[in-house]
Image (cartoon, rainbow, N blue to C red):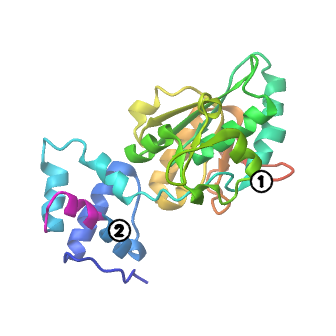
Amino acid sequence: MQSQITTQLPYTQDDFKLLRDAIYTYSGIFISDDYQGIFMRRLERRLLMLAMDSFHEYYYYLKYDQQNNDEFKKLMDVITIKETYFFREVDQMKTLVNEVIPELRREKPRETIKIWSAACSTGEEAYTIAMLCIEKGYHLGNSRVEIFANDISQEAVQKAKQGVYKQTSFRNTDQAYLHRFFTEHEKGTFKIRDEAKEPVNFFCINLLDHNRLTFLPTFDVIFCRNLLIYFNEHSKRNVIETFYQKLYPERYLFLGHSESLINFTYLFKLRHFQHSLVYQRA
């Protein structure tokens, strides 16, 4: 069933398909017909910012204006969903700090443990990992934890770097963490302390940009939760193969609870921990 959400500006099915295909080519995100209304409503915000009155005009601006190299990046800020919060799917975090990292520290006692929070949105996941690692003392010593976090949205990455959050980001946060790792900011917001910022490196990158991804290090753990559901099979395969290449052998990939690698058993096997099921690189 297609979305019944309407826009102020009229559009045709051809407008929708042209814009959807352009965004898919750039980002790998495929907008199904079910989300057509939501998608076009969000696109409309960008048209209004540019004082345009036609989706067709915007498509040509997006595709053919040679002075317009950053428009796709700005568009990602408008259409991507940035809904997340601290300590989301916390059982996976418990598995990370109580089982996975201790195992890694035993196996590589003098090496830095590298964790990648892929598609990190506004940073809550990466900072949650940092807080839990600091609590365990994993930020100290030779086998300390270093966290890399990326998103395709420049706006999301900038907010993550600022580290200022509204109350909605703390819906699943124990008050003890709020008091230890945050200071009260302005207008009912909270700012993360430098102690939790220090282990995290934020950057903007598209997970399908293989040229830029080559500059990333090899990781011990990758988190990529609730992103693959927005990809079609081709884009999903590209991303999973990238994760395979960027993980050390027998290292770990955390996905969202609704996501599966059933078609990628030649790359990853499922491993049972006390609190979670985690994919392990072959």
194 horizontally vs 93: left or right? left
| Disc 1 packing (10 Å; few <14; some 14–19; many ≥20) | few
Which quarter of the figure has residue 55?
bottom left
Q: Is residue 282 visible?
A: no
Q: Amino acid at mark 2?
A: Phe
Image coordinates of residue 244 in percent, x first then y, are 60, 38
Farthest-out residue, right: 274
Q: Which residue is mark 1?
A: 91
Image coordinates of residue 47 in percent, x first then y, are 21, 62
Image coordinates of residue 36 in percent, x first then y, are 35, 73
Q: Which residue is mark 2?
A: 39
Residue 142 shown in magenta: no
Q: Amino acid at mark 1?
A: Asp
Give how far apart the Cα atoms at labels 2 and 1 are.
32 Å
Q: Nearer the viewer, residue 117 or 208?
A: 117
Over which residues does the magenta segment extend? Answer: 43-53
Q: Is residue 140 above or below residue 71?
A: above
**Residue positioned 24% across, 64% down in the render:** 18
Quarter of the picture containing the C terminus is: top right
